[in-house]
Image (cartoon, helix red, strand yellow):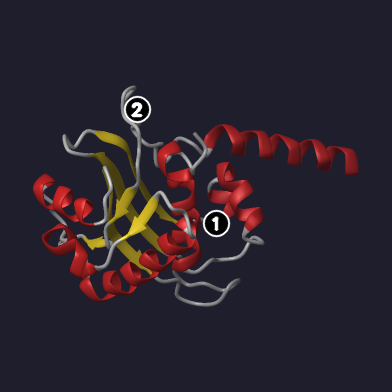
Amino acid sequence: MKRMLRVAAAGLLALAAGGCAGKNGGPDKEKLPDFRLSCAAVLPVAQAAEAGQQALAEGAAVLNQQLRGYFGNRTDIRLISADEAGDAGGPRTSLAAAKAAAEKVGCNAILETTLHRYKERLGGEYTAKEPAAIGFSYRLLALPDGAALCRGRFDEEQEPLMNNLFKFRQSAENGFAWVTAERLLEQGLHERLDSCSFLSGKK
């Protein structure tokens, strides 16, 4: 019986490994052969205009904090303030505004992140009435021409394990509990940015 359970668990893990990459899609990476990153300026998170503003404002604050934690003290990443961002801090950043913001901190690339939805879990860890849901997109632009080095989107609402066995590994990491929107956002951020060598530092 134990052997059968081990075989079943191994099969679920194999399914998870094969199926997790597809739902949100990895970044559309356009590596430029002659591009050398001096540093990347990280704009404050923009909020999608079409979504509920109060929830997005809370989520944007969380995502800005998570970006600071993700990049830590790296010298090739500069997180810029709203004042430094100027006109580049909105949902429709122009290339001219992005270039001006990056030049203020001496960088030749800029990271734009937009939060599209942020819905908190209703209920407890094991008794949630509604699951958390988050959605964001990002793009890393080379300057001065604005070519995309990396881009991607993550949009997810947590599902019960039996509804999606491809998420077995993520469910196990979360202790088979309903997570908060902050936790789901953190997982999505790491999944996306880890896929971009310019941002993950794993070139």
Residue kind at label 1, given as amino acid type: Pro
Mark yes or no: residue 1 visible. no
Secondary structure at numbered mark 2 = loop
x and y, in percent, of residue 176 in the image: 64, 60
Q: Is residue 158 above or below residue 121?
A: above
Which residue was labeled with disc 2? Answer: 31
x and y, in percent, of residue 173 in the image: 64, 56
Q: Residue at x 20, y 51 (%)?
A: 103
Q: Is residue 201 above or below residue 187?
A: above
Closer-to-camera residue (107/11): 107
Q: Is residue 63 above or below residue 41?
A: below
Disc 1: CA contacts within 10 A as few (<14), some (14-19) or many (>=20): some
x and y, in percent, of residue 62 in the image: 39, 70
Task: Using residue 201 as the reference point, say whether residue 5 is left or right of it.
Answer: right
**Residue 18 numbered mark, or none:** none
N-terminal label among 1 and 2: 2
Q: Residue at x 57, y 74 (%)?
A: 127
Farthest residue to the front: give it: 106
x and y, in percent, of residue 107 in the image: 28, 47
Which residue was labeled with disc 1? Answer: 160
Picture quarter containing residue 165?
top right
Question: Where the N terminus falls, by quadrant?
Answer: top right
Q: Residue at x 49, y 42 (%)?
A: 201
Secondary structure at numbered mark 1 = loop
Disc 2: CA contacts within 10 A as few (<14), some (14-19) or many (>=20): some
Residue kind at label 2, given as amino acid type: Lys
